[in-house]
Amino acid sequence: MTKHLTSGIRRVGDLELGQDLDFQRRSWRIERVGWGVMLLMVVAALLGLFGGDAVLNQAALGTIDSGLRVQYHHVDRVLDPTHLRVELDGSGRLWLANSFLERVLIDEIIPEPEQMIAGEERTTFVFALAEADAAGTVLIYYKPQRIGPLSGQIGVEGGDSYDLQQFIFP
């Protein structure tokens, strides 16, 4: 037993050093993998995969030519203010699914809707557009209330509708 313990110890000058080069090399590999993972996390954060206004976090649905365009973030944080930017054309009647509205707290809608009509499955917001064929931009500021996936539908009455898909981090 004593022979086994002393076999890995070498004498260098006045010092006795124990070495296990295989273990040391494995440790270095694991350390390099850890550095790589940390670097990937920093790059992902800078690109917006964990929230914010960066490139990979931007989402857009529809086109203004179709009567509805929605811009939002793929990823947000719970209780952090965020917004939907909606460009609508025509009727000025925008609706949001109640399944979405139940999981967020709406802080402000700009411009303020003239009327809100609550239905069983969705709530319609009526906006005054200057002309019947005028396009308008609506900003809906809200705070997500729960962690996890957040989904719902948005649309214009008598027109297109889209599925919103977000993920809410703690």
Image (tube, helix red, strand yellow):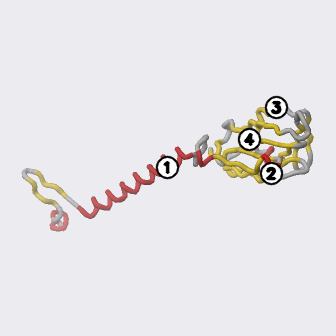
Residue in view at x 91 percent, y 42 percent: 118
The tag earlier along the polypeptide, 3 or 4, is 4
Q: Is residue 24 above or below residue 43?
A: below
Mark 2 lies on residue: 153
Viewer-side label of 1, 3: 3
Instruction: Tell me how far mark 1 sits from mark 3, CA to CA.
Output: 38 Å
Task: Judge by depth and name the residue closer to the eye, 59 or 5.
Answer: 59
Horizontal side of 89 relative to 40 (left or right) equals right
Amino acid of disc 3: Pro
Amino acid of disc 4: Leu
Mark 1 lies on residue: 41
Instruction: Tell me how far mark 2 sits from mark 3, CA to CA.
Output: 21 Å
Mark 3 neighbour class, 10 Å CA radius: few under 14, some 14 to 19, many 20 or more: few
Q: Is residue 127 above or below residue 161?
A: above
Element carrying mark 3: loop
Amino acid of disc 2: Gln
Label 1–label 2 contact, CB within 8 A:
no
Q: Which mark is residue 84?
A: 4
